[in-house]
Amino acid sequence: MRPRQVLAAGATAIALITAACGGSDTTTAGDEEARRVDVDMVDTDFAPNSIEVAAGETVRFVFHNRGEVVHDAFLGDADARADHEAEIRDEHGGHGSSDDAIKVDPGQTGELTHTFDSAGTVEIGCHEPGHYDAGMKIVIDVL
């Protein structure tokens, strides 16, 4: 097998294993298959709080705000999160504008779809005041 075939086979295997465990399914996102990951937002927690994805994999995160307050979800590395925090402060509590950020009101659902281009670690964090500092984040290990 060529390296791309191995990567594609690995991504498919991870998606199938995860789907078999009941945590997600696959859907079509454009021309690519996207793995669906459901995320509960409650108080200052995301569940799940960590996942693994394959480099090149597309994941559709579906956020369910089951709490009493607004939450946001921002996906990025440490520098991107710092920029997002600054943007929120500059907008006096706004949520900024990014393809990797959403705001979810109580009782509502929101989605982010992202293709993980390279190996490493990124996070999804809630940047409502105090939430990220309280641990409201998802660590994403890109293999």
Image (cartoon, grey):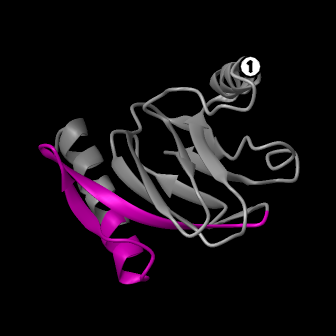
Which element is circle 1 on?
Answer: helix
Of residues 5 and 107, the one nearer the viewer is 107
> Which residue is drawn at the image coordinates 36% and 82% (left, top)?
20
Q: Nearer the viewer, residue 2 or 58?
A: 58
Residue 55, image x, y percentages: 40, 40
Tell how many labels.
1
Q: Is residue 31 left or right of residue 79?
A: left
Q: Is residue 40 magenta?
A: yes
Q: Residue at x 58, y 48 (%)?
A: 140
The answer to which quarter of the image holds residue 84 is top right
In this rendering, position of residue 115 left or right of residue 34: right
Q: Is residue 73 left or right of residue 20?
A: right
Residue 49 place in picture, x, y as percent: 67, 61
Q: Residue furthest left?
A: 31
Q: In which image quadrant can residue 42 be found? A: bottom right
From this view, report whether residue 83 is shown above or below residue 69.
above
Mark 1 Cα-neighbour bin, 10 Å: few <14, some 14–19, many ≥20: few
Residue 102 point in image, percent of width and height:
52, 43
* Direction front: furthest residue: 92
For mark 1, what is the residue?
A: 86
Q: Against 141, is 110 above or below?
A: below
| Of the pair 64 and 140, the residue shown nearer to us | 64
Is residue 115 placed above or below 60 in the rendered structure? Answer: above
**Left or right: 58 as drawn, with respect to 53:** left
Circle 1: residue type: Ala
Q: Residue at x 77, y 23 (%)?
A: 89
| Residue 135 on the magenta span | no
- Rendered location of residue 97, percent (x, y): 51, 26
The residue lying at 56 percent from left, 59 percent from top is: 51
Viewer-closest of 129 and 35: 129
Q: What range of the chain is rendered magenta?
A: 15-43
